[in-house]
Image (spheres, rainbow, N blue to C red):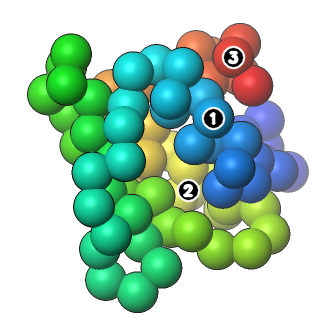
Amino acid sequence: MGRLSGFRYREIVKILKRLGFEFHHQAAGSHEIWFNPETGRFTTIPNHSGSTPEGTLRAILKQAGIEPDELLKLG
């Protein structure tokens, strides 16, 4: 398991809120769009049970402009 494995939806959302992201709207199925008004960035978060796969979390972080180390520090 990588160092970004094991994060659940609620943990990811909690960290995104600390970084200034807000819920923007519901997307297709169980996905949500979050927006940071300070940076103008959007990111898509799947609202699934269980842990978010590491590759999915890396894609979320890339969209949001967040370094993995910053997430680990806040998580």
Residue 24 appears left or right of 6 = left
Taking 53 as reference, is 20 above or below it?
Answer: above
Q: Which residue is mark 1?
A: 14
**Which numbered disc covers residue 74?**
3
In-front residue for pair 36/63: 36
User: The residue under label 1 is which amino acid type?
Assistant: Lys
13 w.r.t. 69: above or below: below
Q: Quadrant of residue 36?
A: top left
Instruction: Give the spatial CA distance, label 3 vs label 1.
Output: 9 Å
Q: Residue lying farthest left? A: 40
Q: Give the labeled residue for mark 2.
A: 55
Residue closest to the far bottom: 29
Look at 80% across and 69% down and name the residue there: 50
The residue located at (43%, 47%) in the rendering is: 60
Q: CA distance from mark 3 to mark 2?
A: 19 Å
Residue 18 visible within the image: yes
* Residue 62 in sight in this render: no
Amino acid type at image mark 3: Leu
Q: Nearer the viewer, mark 2 or mark 1?
A: 1
Provide residue 28's location: percent of width, then percent of height: 31, 83
Query: Quick one: quadrant of the C terminus?
Result: top right
Nearer the observer, 46 or 21 = 21
Above or below residue 7? Residue 71 is: above
Give the residue type that dot 2 points to: Gly
Mark with earlier residue (2, 1): 1
Tell me if residue 19 comes above or below residue 47 in the rendering.
above
What residue do we see at 50% from left, 29% from top?
17
The residue carrying pointer 1 sits among few (fewer than 14), some (14 to 19) or many (20 or more) residues within 10 Å by Cα, namely few
Whichever of labels 3 and 2 marks the residue nearer the N terminus, that label is 2
